[in-house]
Amino acid sequence: MSIADTMIPPQAPPPAPPKPYTLSRFLGSVALGIWLALGVGIFFTVVEGWDPEKFSRYGPSFLSGLGVTLMLVTSSILMGAVLSLPVALGRMSKHRVWSWLAYGYVYFFRGTPLITQLFLVYYGLGSFRPQLESIGLWWFFRDAWNCALFTFTLNTAAYQAEILRGAIESVPRGQHEGAAALGLPERVAFFKVILPQAMIVALRPYGNEIILMIKGSAIVAIVTVFDLMGETRRAFSRTFDYQMYVWAAALYLLMVELLRNIWGWLEARLTRHLKR
Amino acid sequence: MSGLFAALFSGLAWIVSTIDPFCGPAGVFRWFGSGTLLACGDTGWGDEIAYGFLVTASLAIATLPVGLVIGFFIALAKQSNERSLRLAANIYTTIFRGLPELLTLFIVYYGLQILVQQFLASLGYEGPVEINAFAAGMIALGVVFSAYCSEVLLSAFKAIPHGQYEAGDALGFHRGKTMRLIILPQLVRIALPGLGNLWMALLKDTALVSVVGLPDILRQTGIAARVTKEAFQFFGIACILFLILAMFSSIAFAALERWTKRAEMRR
């Protein structure tokens, strides 16, 4: 009988096999290299073309443009949210006329480009100037900012109504039945049972809609509203300096990425009870 | 050779003018628009608007394959094992999904102009350079489309179980053949609804290219509106034309979806 009195000393792990140099690795390095070169190139052109006078002249106007964009998007999203409620209810209604009206509204605003709708309101309603003056609405539609706000509100209301409808219809039937079995009145059941669950489903599409509105709002620059894009175009037409577009791109990217991260955090926070 | 091309183009032009739904022999504007502002020919705006319709449709159709191909490869890069490739692809989508389409268009349009000008200046040519608005629109919209497309395709790739790749290996297919015969047919089936939405967005984004001077629906109706002072009528027509395009595409996509799912239906 033999007893082992010395243990085998711990061994170092075998060396990792060498990573083969694959095609995808090569492509990845090339692609990253291109991005890096682009980034460095843009950085150097910005540094080289840096002009403190230009910055002090156009910097504040860029900031005011940013404010105009944010103001336009926020107010149209909020007003669109209010307007989307009746539209969504109309879409879900069993009454044929209401549902067809709501469907037509949504189809029109989702099927045509935002820029065409804006032109239709801003230039098109000018054809009805006498009629608008007689009912006292001309002062409203004369202003490009009001027209943009009006169009964006109607447009986002159509999209938000679809989001809301999809979310409400995604709540399973059993939830309605459960609320009914508990004897909850329909109103209470809707606001305390259905809507909270629907809102979780709707959260991500709402975030996407806000991002789409931020990006879509750039077109108001064409109808002479000086938002971020409008200020950029004005600065570019005065200086012929390509840097202006780089600045605008950076600001837009910042806005969208910030919103996306806030939304990701919000979603993680609100759905933490659903994690398995 | 040039004679052949000329014959081809004149033949194509003849076909287009015969089946033209606006100003052709059976066109809407020819039958219902004569005598109004929408008449065809020199007296009305019918043929100009019909041309704009053609330009819009062809821009969207020309952009689609470019965006699809780039988007497919970006999606492949995003699910690669190589970290640098994934990072590069993610930078691409972050940038082009975050920028407004209008800004992307301006950056491409003016940026290309500056680049070409500098390149020509280095060759010794000094003069004004004008970039084709159609090409600039195609690049800008294609890049944006591909960024969104890669996301749709990536989620479709994730929906295909790993066993499908293993089945390809078990059958002795190499990677390209597995992709072509096993993965792609299922990928199309899963991704088609998402791609349909992207196509609708692309169709609507083409209206932006009118800003840099492409004679599409919006620009042609805009010119007509400015000349005739009938802005509401002409922009209304622009809206209706876009609605018609959207309607036809939704019909086409529904048919396409039925066609890709024909194997599932028989069960």
Image (spheres, helix red, strand yellow):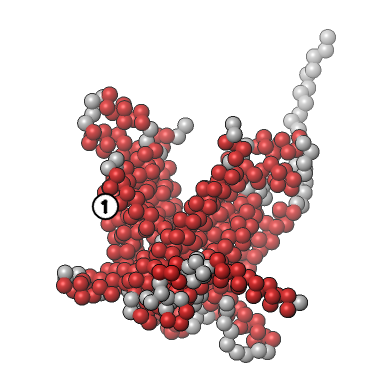
x 55%, y 66%: residue? B19
Q: Is residue B153 above or below residue A217?
A: above
Residue neighbourhood size for the residue with mark 1, other residues' Cα within 10 Å, grouped as few (<14), some (14–19), many (≥20): some
Can residue B219 be seen from the camera position used here?
no
Q: Where is residue B167 in the image (x, y as percent from the top left)?
A: 72, 35
Residue B163 relative to residue B141: left or right: right
x 49%, y 71%: residue? B23
Chain of residue at mark 1: A
Quadrant position of the C terminus of chain B in the picture? top right
Which sits in the foreground, B175 or A51? B175
Residue A264 relative to residue A93: left or right: right
Q: Where is residue B231 in the image (x, y as percent from the top left)?
A: 34, 74
Mark 1 element type? helix
Amino acid identity at mark 1: Val
x 63%, y 53%: residue? B72
From the image, tell me which residue sits under label 1: A82
Q: In this view, does B164 lie above or below B40?
A: above
Can residue A112 be seen from the camera position used here?
yes
Residue A43 relative to residue A236: left or right: right
